Image (cartoon, grey):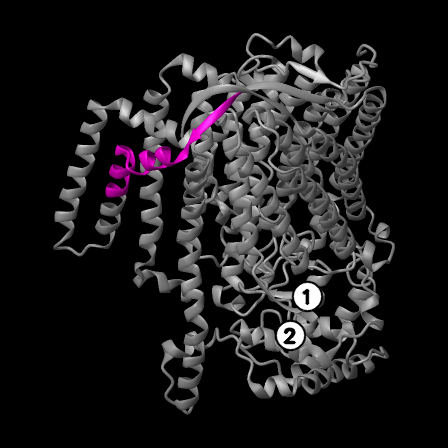
Amino acid sequence: MYQEFFTDSTLLAWPMVGLAIFVISFIAVILYVVYGLKDPDKRGHIAALPLEDEPVVVGVQQSGRSAR
Amino acid sequence: MAATETRMRTVVYDDDICRAFSLATVIWGAVALLLGAIVASQLSFWQLNLNTSWLSFGRLRPLHTNAAIFAFVGNMMFAGIYYSTQRLLKARMASDGLSWFNFWGWQIIIVAAAVTLPLGMTQGKEYAELIWPIDIAIAVVWVAFAINFFWTIARRNEPNLYVAIWFYIATIVTIAVLHIVNSLALPTSFTHSYPIWAGVQDALVQWWYGHNAVAFFLTTPILGIMYYFLPKAAERPVYSYRLSVVHFWSLVFIYIWAGPHHLLYTALPNWAQTLGMIFSLMLWAPSWGGMLNGLLTLRGAWNKFYTDPVIKFFVVAVTFYGMSTFEGPLLSIKSVSALGHYTDWIIGHVHGGALGWNGFMAIGMMYWLVPKLWGTTLYSKRLADIHFWIATIGILMYVVSMWVSGVSQGLFWQALDADGFLLYPDFIEGLENSKAMYHMRLMGGLLFLLSYVIGMVNLFATIKQGTKTTVKVEVPALVQETVQGARSLIFSTPVIFSVVVILLSVWLGMADLLTSPLVLGLLCVAVAAAGLSFATGRDRWARWHDLIERNGFAFTVLVLVAILIGGVVQIIPTVVISGKVPAQVLAYEEALKAADGSDVDPVLAEKAKWMQRPYSPLELEGRDLYIREGCYTCHSQMIRPLRHEVLRYGDYSRLEESLLNHPFQWGSKRTGPDLARVGGKYANLWHYLHFMDPRQTSPASNMPSYHWFKDASVNLAATHKKMQTMVALGVPYSDDDLLSAEATGLSQGRLIAADLAEQQIVIEPDSEMAAIIAYLQRLGRGPQAVSADDVATGGR
């Protein structure tokens, strides 16, 4: 049937090219993670971003009671 | 982007928008869960369809899925993104106007979906059912959200983009691409359209969209939220920032390739199925890396699991993420898919993700966020604990019942006797055996709904006892030098080497026998040079990612390239082949005519056997009714090349059989049997009785009655407009076909009406009943034009 169309087609080079790009990019990311993020201070700074406090809160009426 | 800290800046966060999305999340969550309970109850008790068209399962089920995905998780996603983005970038959202446009636009879209889907206005593609004007509205609102988000990145005061922001970028870019490509359609009216894709193209594009809607709407933004809110709740940074980087890039690269695992053993070409399966298996590693990263963030803080309801919900959510991302690749293995596909196992898998991962993350986030936004503490930890335990029991009941039901169905369908024939030829027997599990699923869903109502009470009590807060912070202002950053990025050593290696790889793939050794040699030299450069200048290579990480635009472009690769290499070859096949078919038809029947080339004759002709006007109207009623939610039209399927349903489905189908209707679930070759299998009378009351022909059926088909009529006078749209999409209707559409439709309807009249049944020739019967009698009889006699007798 028409699935056979692909047996003579060069179109299947596309997935191979995509796969090559994927592999190269993946290696690049691993190299970055191993060597580029070697400095613990640098990693620590970025990783701590969500934990930075919100120092000033205005307009709050602390009327809530303790959690139970 | 190089950055210099110069002066302090006061930032007031826009938390009103977060409060609005939080409230919308809580309310729409209840609606989505209630709809889920209703459709589950309809599967248990068919009477609950209430004999009402707009309350029937086929129409409400898409409303349930859309409400769960886009209303519940969508609003939760926006709430989390607006809250965390401002704090991670140390900047207020760039435009309050765009934020509120995003909010109200999204709510209007949800309401529009809630009105149109029960009315049967649908495009008939799973999770993409909404009609074209709503699709355009979604695109506009999403673009407004994207502009606001990237504008905020440009105005930020924090040089580094935390990994949560990466996940949000991937979400925004990918959903835009998926939604636009999958929604391309030609309208026939304000409420109706046909997709530009057909058959296998449509199947591939739809599941590229469908799978990645799960990936980039239900997973990546929620992972971003996990990477922000879990450390907040645990009061410690993420376990491994390095692992989060690998997690991100791996997911973005791999997820987009995995869509074809929804189409294993279908008429999709094998190479695409294999790619989908392999990449799905590869997803296992990064997904579990992310799960472990989440759970290990609690190192040293596991005591909070016993005391903090937020942590409780987050831990179970991340655990369900791990379970779902284990089960997904497992189901993508072809032999497992052969058992599990079309069964309730898939429903269990989906709900493990939707209720366990998305639902628990949403609830955990709300329990953390609502007290913050209203400047108070959670009203009751005890209520939250009760919520947690009831919800957990509810999910487990749901998922386990669907596992049992699904695996049983798969084994039941494929069971063969000693002679190699079906052990259980009656499909309905399998459904009867699933009833107990359907009841258990309903109980699990009701428990989850009950727990959610308790959660709502707790959250609204929290809001009532608090007051809206305004958060003001002093942050170091950031001076941005983007031009230098972008140039450094483009001409950096890793980029140059990567481009060279990729180009040489492409060349090698296309090279002939003589030039390939030369190209291979060049490739080896390039790789060796890259290795040498890396060994002698690791700092240069390391700085490259730092530049990307700080340059929002470059980062977005890279993400776009990453997600486009997987889609393009799968979709383009399929579009090319599908574009060629109809022309070939017509050429064979002409050649056969010229061969006067006595000297026919057997190869040509075999191919001509699978020729496709467009649907007749009445069949086309019937097909639109099939789509309107959501029949695809329970019936497939795709017979897999497996012995038990061929024995049960007939010859396996071919790629070319659905080439003219805009949209494809292969389906993904079999609560009822496959219909790909139902044409001619039953008499017209059988179909009439079945639609009026399915229990007349199948006593154990849980299908709703479609009695309204008898009295409602189709507008055959307007069918030629639909056919004209089909012609614009490449369906080979002739001018004569268009001119005679109404007459042909009525003629075919009269034949069916006359046949039924012999059995003392009276229907009008232009009734919906005549149209749907005409369509069903056509299914699986592709090559043959449906003759008047065939239609009249149902092929007996």
Which residue carries the number 1 mark? Answer: B192
Q: CA distance from mark 1 to mark 2?
A: 9 Å
x then y, percent, for residue B666: 58, 58
Quarter of the image with the N terminus of chain B is: top left
Q: Compared to B547, does B795 lie above or below?
A: below
x then y, percent, for residue B420: 53, 54
Q: Quadrant of residue B742?
A: bottom right
Could one spot residue B192 in this view of the protein? Answer: yes
- Residue type, mark 2 in image: Lys
| Along the viewing direction, whichever of B539 and B359 lies nearer the viewer | B539
- Residue type, mark 1 in image: His
Is the C-beta separation of discs 1 and 2 under 8 Å?
yes
Q: Residue at horizontal 64%, vertical 22%? A: B314
Magenta-tinted stretch: B476-501
Q: Residue at horizontal 64%, vertical 28%? A: B83
x then y, percent, for residue B24: 75, 37
Chain of the residue displaying label 2 = B
For the residue labelled by badge 2, is the local secondary structure a helix, a strand or a loop?
helix
Which residue carries the number 2 mark? Answer: B722
Which tag, 1 or 2, sits closer to the chain's start? 1
| Along the viewing direction, whichever of B37 and B430 lies nearer the viewer | B37
| Along the viewing direction, whichever of B169 and B222 lies nearer the viewer | B169
Could one spot residue B642 in this view of the protein? Answer: no
